[in-house]
Image: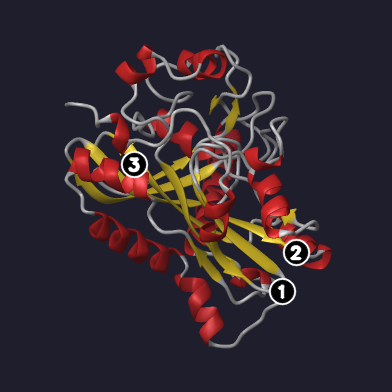
Amino acid sequence: MNAPAPEDLPPAEAPLVDAKDLRGWVCHEDARLLAIDKPGWLVVHPSKNGPWSSLAGAVRAGLGLETIRLIYRLDRETSGVIVLAKDADTGRRLQKAVARRALGKAYAVLLDGELEGPVTVDQPLGPDTEANVTVKQRVVAAGTPGAQEAHTVFHPLIVREGCTLAGVELTTGRKHQIRAHAEWLGRRVLGDKLYGPDPTLYREFAEQGWTARHSALLPLTRQALHCAAIDLRPAGMDHVLRAPWPRDLARFAELRMHLPAAEAQAAIDAFVARVFAANELSRASGETPAVPPVESARARYRRESAEARRGRATTRDEAGAHEGETPGSVQ
């Protein structure tokens, strides 16, 4: 399958932010909040290359906002909606919601390979000690040093030409969670330098920039991962903030999957509506419970986890009784 022409791809080397473009990235702004549709080549946190090399620096320099708080981060090559608070109280409120996993998040991703149906990945993640870079994560056994629980649900939205446009629900927010779980599934994120066909491409890119090996092995110059929507209603703020399907991924999907941008956007919008349905019902009823509502995937995860724990406990008790142990004493 032929790779797209270079003019159809996002930039391989990140440029500086153009002040004229910055205002066009704003997808919501009010007295307390600023939401930005971040392109997939821009780092979030300030860098050594000056204010116009990062989202935080550009917002301060270009929009005149000295006091901002990032509520969460996205990797440089992940596009989509980023939420910033304009005051300390709003920042603390939303950061606490993030810490208790209350905010709703919906991602869209292009995967290498066809995903036949929804897949739940409930596998711990920890450092990949065999990788040539320290940032890489991988699925590890529970109890491994550094292991953290991680739960991801992949929903195939459109499957064509050996690729899948999938919606992704997260109920944990681990480093590189979507990408590491996709690798474990054998359905890597297209364009991923670290979790793709050869993880050495990541270090090579950092040291040399885009090379002939990248062109040969990767169909995109950035990972095809997009944060499509954030639901702030569980934090008591009546906002669902969205970032449209980005032009670079839309163009790639058109060429590789024969997937029109409007069709992809409609599928993503329907997925977002399903993910945030529980929060919508709570908002419509006018309820503002002390414990915020959570999206359906999280509730399902907790229920399934509790059932699994009960099942393991029952198995241990039965085994212990059979072997002459006191039920419940097997650790």
Q: Gap in Å between the C-alphas at discs 2 and 1?
A: 7 Å
Tally the marks.
3
Residue nearest the observer in this picture, 146 or 220 = 220
Q: State which tag comes first along the sequence, 3 or 2.
A: 2
Mark 3 and mark 1 lie on one chain; the one further toward the N terminus is: 1
Disc sitting over residue 86 in the figure: 2
| Nearest the eye: 87 or 186 | 87
> In the rendering, at what x and y percent does residue 33 appear?
67, 67
The disc labelled 2 sits on which kind of residue?
Lys
Residue 110, disc: 3
Q: Residue at x 65, y 28 (%)?
A: 143
Compared with 282, 158 (above or below) is: above
Q: Which quadrant is home to the C terminus?
A: top right
Sequence-earlier tag: 2 or 1? 1
Q: Residue at x 56, y 46 (%)?
A: 18
Q: Nearer the viewer, residue 101 or 66?
A: 66
The image quarter containing residue 289 is bottom right
Q: Secondary structure at mark 1?
A: loop
Residue at image coords 38%, 44% = 109
Q: Amino acid at mark 3?
A: Leu
Q: Mark 2 touching mark 1, by CB under 8 A? A: yes
